[in-house]
Image (cartoon, rainbow, N blue to C red):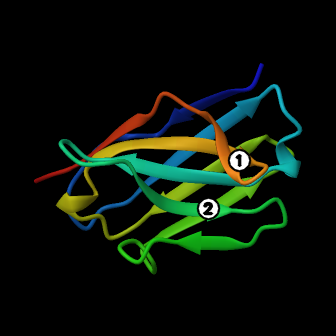
Amino acid sequence: QVQLVESGGGLVQPGGSLTLSCVVSGSIFSSYPMGWYRQAPGKQRELVATITGGGSTYYAGSVKGRFTISRDNAKNTVYLQMNSLKPEDTAVYYCTQGGGGSWNYWGKGTLVTVSS
């Protein structure tokens, strides 16, 4: 059974930084692409960033240059480093594991609140 557990969310002031972590168990972690999505109150879930097993990355335009996705295959962990945070980054952030052209497994999410 594949499980994803996010951590690292919290309250941060505008302009601040946070790093989210997602630990994966029950799968051959290095073989699969990983992604971060977010869902703000009243809005649809949106893609934030992805990383392939080989380390290629993709970012949504709204976070490009501010967020960095990375992975440590030895620790079965994917990270999302978030800098220069804005109030509009406030959302529940979800970690997901892909394969076969779809996102197959999801964590329960971690809340990030950007507010002064």
Residue visible at 25% across and 51% down? 90
Mark drawn on residue 78? none
Q: Are marks 2 and 1 in contact (CB under 8 Å)?
A: yes
In this rendering, position of residue 31 left or right of residue 21: right
Residue visible at 45% across and 33% down? 109
Q: Is residue 105 above or below residue 101?
A: above
Q: Nearer the viewer, residue 35 or 74?
A: 35
Are there few (<14), some (14-19), or many (20+) residues within 10 Å of tag 2? many
In this rendering, position of residue 87 left or right of residue 57: left
Residue position for label 1: 98
Q: Nearer the viewer, residue 81 or 91?
A: 91
| Marks 2/1: CA–CA distance | 10 Å
Residue visible at 67% across and 35% down? 23
Residue 35, position in %: x, y? Answer: 60, 53
Secondary structure category for the residue under label 2: strand
Say what amino acid the circle numbered 1 marks.
Answer: Gly
Are there few (<14), some (14-19), or many (20+) residues within 10 Å of tag 1? some
Residue 16, position in %: x, y? Answer: 30, 62
Secondary structure category for the residue under label 1: strand
Q: Nearer the viewer, residue 40 or 86?
A: 40
Residue 80, position in %: x, y? Answer: 54, 56
Mark drawn on residue 50? 2
Query: Mark 2 or mark 1: which comes first in sequence?
Result: 2
Say what amino acid the circle numbered 2 marks.
Answer: Thr
Residue 54, position in %: x, y? Answer: 84, 66
Q: Quadrant of residue 97?
A: top right
Q: Nearer the viewer, residue 70 or 57?
A: 57
Residue visible at 20% across and 56% down? 13
In this rendering, position of residue 25 left or right of residue 105: right
